[in-house]
Image (tube, rainbow, N blue to C red):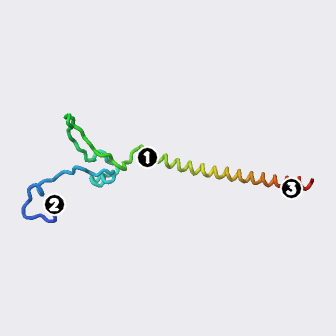
Amino acid sequence: MLNLVVVARGPAEIDGLTTENIARRLGPKRASNIRKFWSLSKAQDVRKFVIARTFTTKKGKTVTKRPKIQRLVTPVVRQRKRARAVAKVQHREKVRRDAQEYARLTAQRALERAASRRSSRRSSRRE
């Protein structure tokens, strides 16, 4: 087997090498690479341009196989992204509320401790 690149064409065509165009068996799988390969715009549907493979099974049924498109932005993907953003904001708010509650509790307990110390000193002086 030779893996070569044709740099310059000679005087005549070579049968089977320069006369035929062989279609790609496998195409790109990632959405952005499919767009680049077919030079599509953002508005065009990438799913229609995936290179599919049609064949017949042993039972004689015709089947079309195409790869799963990776990094395809679908409504579900957008929904999950929004949900993650909302969860982040809610968690930030919860942490802030919890911190305020903790600060309030510690301040209240510090006052109670100080009050109990004062009351215990007074009672010991009187006796």
Crowd tier of the residue under label 3, counting other residues whose Cα lies within 10 Å: few below 14, some 14–19, many 20 or above: few
The residue depicted at 9 percent of the width and 64 percent of the height is: 10
Q: Secondary structure at mark 1?
A: helix
Given residues 69 and 38, the one toward you in this image is 69
Q: Secondary structure at mark 2?
A: loop
Work out whether mark 3 precedes mark 1 in sequence or the reverse, and give the earlier one. Answer: 1
Residue 5 coordinates in the image, percent (x, y): 17, 62
The residue depicted at 26 percent of the width and 42 percent of the height is: 65
Indicate the quadrant where residue 11 lies.
bottom left
For the residues carrying marks 3 and 1, which lies nearer the camera in this image? 3
Work out whether mark 2 precedes mark 1 in sequence or the reverse, and give the earlier one. Answer: 2
Q: Amino acid at mark 1?
A: Arg
Q: Report the residue that reaches farthest toward the right.
A: 127
The residue depicted at 31 percent of the width and 54 percent of the height is: 33
Q: To which residue does mark 3 refer?
A: 121
Q: To which residue does mark 2 refer?
A: 2
* Residue 96 falls left or right of residue 82: right
The residue depicted at 17 percent of the width and 62 percent of the height is: 4
Distance, label 3 to label 1, CA atoms, is: 65 Å
Q: Secondary structure at mark 3?
A: helix
